[in-house]
Amino acid sequence: MATNFTDDIGPMAYPLKMVSKEVVEHMLGWNIPEEHQDLVHEHWRNFPAVSKYWHYVLALIYTMLMVTSLLGNGIVIWIFGTSKSLRSPSNMFVINLAVFDLMMMLEMPLLIMNSFYQRLVGYQLGCDIYAVLGSLSGIGGAITNAVIAFDRYKTISCPLDGRINKVQAAILIAFTWFWAMPFTILPALKIWGRFVPEGFLTTCSFDYFTDDQDTKVFVGCIFVWSYAIPMALICYFYSQLFGA
C-alpha cells in the first residue's frame, strides 16, 4: 500500500490512516477549514502540499536550532547577568540582543507543532502570536545591532569622554523596544497591514501579496523601517571607525 503524504490532519491520525494505491495530491491550504480560508492568499494555493515528511524534517531542524539558541543565548544572559564585572553599558546591549534572539526562539514550539499538524494551529490567533514574536524580535534585533555599532563608534572614536554610561544605555535599550513596536502592533491589530500564513502555511508574516496600494505602501515602509535604516546606521558607524 502506498502512503498518503498529504491526507493527514494531525499526528494522531498517522498510524490510523490507510489509503488506496494512489497517492492523493492536495494543494496548499486544503486542510484549513472553510471559515479560515481567507487567511491563505491565492498565490499559495497554486502550489501542491508538500509531503508530511518534509514537515517532520523541518520540525527536527527547528528543534535543534531552538535548543542551540536557548543554550547559547541563555548562557550569554546568565554570564553577563551574574558577573558584576561584565555589567558594563556595552554588554547591556549584548544582553538586549540575546533577549530578542530568545524571543524569536519562542516561535519555534509553534512552528514545530504546526509542522506536525501540517497547518496553523490556532489559525488567526496562532498566526498572530507567531508573527508578533517574529516581528518584535526581528526588528528589535536589527536596531539593537545598529545601537551596538553606535556604541563601538563612540568608544573607539572618543575613548576618554565618548563612552556611553548606564543611564544612556538604558535609554537606548528602551528605544530599541519602542522602535520594534509600530510594525508589530499595527498589523497585529489590523490597523495597517495584517499577519497571514506563508510558505508551507506553517509560518506567518505580514501580508506582502495583496495587490492594493495600501499593502504596497506598508511593505515599502516596513522595509525601510526594519531593514534599510538599521543597515544604513550599521554601515555608517562602522565605516567611521576607519577614520577614527
Image (tube, helix red, strand yellow):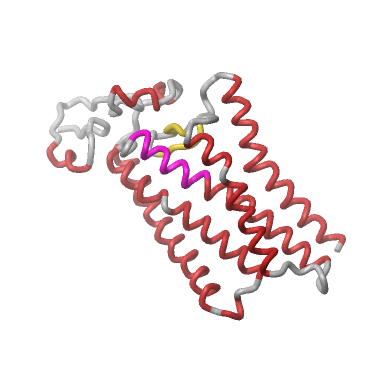
**Location of the N terminus (image quadrant):** top left
Is residue 34 rendered to the left or right of residue 38?
Answer: left
Q: Residue 212 location in percent, x, y?
A: 57, 19
Q: Is residue 78 magenta?
A: no
Residue visible at 66% across and 58% down in the picture? 172
Residue visible at 55% across and 73% down in the picture? 80
User: Which portion, as a residue range, is magenta?
Assistant: 123-135
**Location of the C terminus (image quadrant):** bottom right
Q: Residue 120 location in percent, x, y?
A: 34, 37
Front residue of 8/83: it is: 83
Q: Residue 232 location in percent, x, y?
A: 73, 46
Give the quadrant of residue 92.
bottom right
Residue visible at 68% across and 47% down in the picture? 230
Q: Outermost residue, right direction?
A: 243
Is residue 230 rendered to the left or right of residue 240?
Answer: left
Q: In this picture, is 5 found above or below 43?
A: below
Name the main secondary structure of what is drawn in magenta: helix
Give the quadrant of residue 2.
top left
Give the quadrant of residue 67.
bottom left
Q: Does the magenta stretch include residue 131?
A: yes
Total tally of numbered discs in the picture: 0
Q: Residue 5 location in percent, x, y?
A: 26, 34
Front residue of 222/244: it is: 222
Is residue 29 rendered to the left or right of residue 186?
Answer: left
Front residue of 71/18: it is: 71
Residue visible at 81% across and 61% down in the picture? 241
